[in-house]
Amino acid sequence: MTMPLRPDDGSFLAEVERLSEVPVSACFHCQKCANGCPVAYAMDIAPTVLIRLMQLGQRARVLQSETIWVCASCITCSTRCPNDIDLAHVMDTLRRMSIREGSVSLPHVRTFHEAFLNAIRTHGRVHELELVTRYKLKTMTFFEDMKLGQEMLLRGRMRFLPERIKGRKEVRDMLSPPPARSETKSAL
Ligand code: SF4
Ligand code: SF4
């Protein structure tokens, strides 16, 4: 039996809008974003349905969805929206909220995401070998993709030593986590 959707008091939508600074409530469901999304076929909830769920305050369904992790941040949806709704940025905000609240439904995705961000925090850019090593150690998947990794090393697609950029502090600041939910509530 399908459970009816019960709107909340609007706090979830307000929180998403405040953290992302995107007016999600202005969406008029024209579907242009979903029709242009190159990975919509792999999502468990279509982008426009996800927006509707946000408007209805379905916090758990949104933050536990696979969709927010399948999103490739390609920004196609944001450029197609006639209403200037930056859905790609909303997806990023939802990922951060999902991590903060322990709602990530795909544990390996979360592990990869954290390894990726940690590499960027350290070097200012990704060091693929370190990223893969951290990921493999956490997931104990040492033998998956081994052949691919060897080929990438042989072809110089993965460097043994990391490169560091200038302005690493600025990059770290950009990646700082959003405020805790309690802070968000008090600010509303
Ligand atoms: S393109 Fe914009 S207005 Fe249309 S459904 Fe997507 S987010 Fe909403
Ligand atoms: S940013 Fe994400 S949701 Fe938007 S079109 Fe690209 S993959 Fe789809």
Image: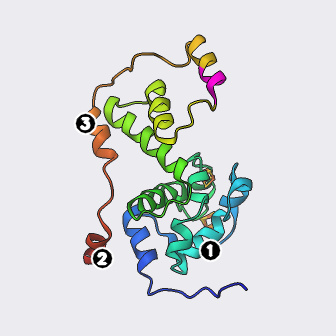
Q: Is mark 1 within 8 Å of ligand 1?
A: yes
- Please name the residue shown 38% across and 61% down the image: 100
User: Where in the figure is residue 128, as x and y percent of width and height?
Assistant: 48, 27
Q: Position of 165 compared to 148: left or right? A: left
User: Where in the figure is residue 10, as x and y percent of width and height?
Assistant: 45, 83
Frontmost of labels 2 and 1 is: 2
Frontmost of labels 3 and 1 is: 3
Q: Amino acid at mark 1?
A: Phe
Q: Secondary structure at mark 2?
A: helix
Q: Amino acid at mark 2?
A: Lys
The residue tagged 2 is 185
N-terminal-most mark, 2 or 1: 1
Q: Is mark 2 within 8 Å of ligand 1?
A: no
Q: Which mark is residue 169?
A: 3
Q: Secondary structure at mark 1?
A: loop
Magenta segment, prevailing SS (helix, strand or loop)? helix
Span shown in magenta: 145-149
In front of the other: 166 or 61? 61
User: Where in the figure is residue 39, as x and y percent of width and height?
Assistant: 69, 50
N-terminal-most mark, 2 or 3: 3
User: Where in the figure is residue 139, as x and y percent of width and height?
Assistant: 51, 41
* Quarter-of-image position of residue 44: bottom right
Q: Is residue 26 visible?
A: no
In reply to whether residue 148 is colored magenta, the answer given is yes
- Please name the residue shown 51% across and 73% down the image: 60
Q: Is mark 3 within 8 Å of ligand 2?
A: no
In front of the other: 20 or 111? 111
- Please name the residue shown 63% across and 55% down the image: 80
N-terminal-most mark, 3 or 1: 1
Q: Amino acid at mark 3?
A: Lys
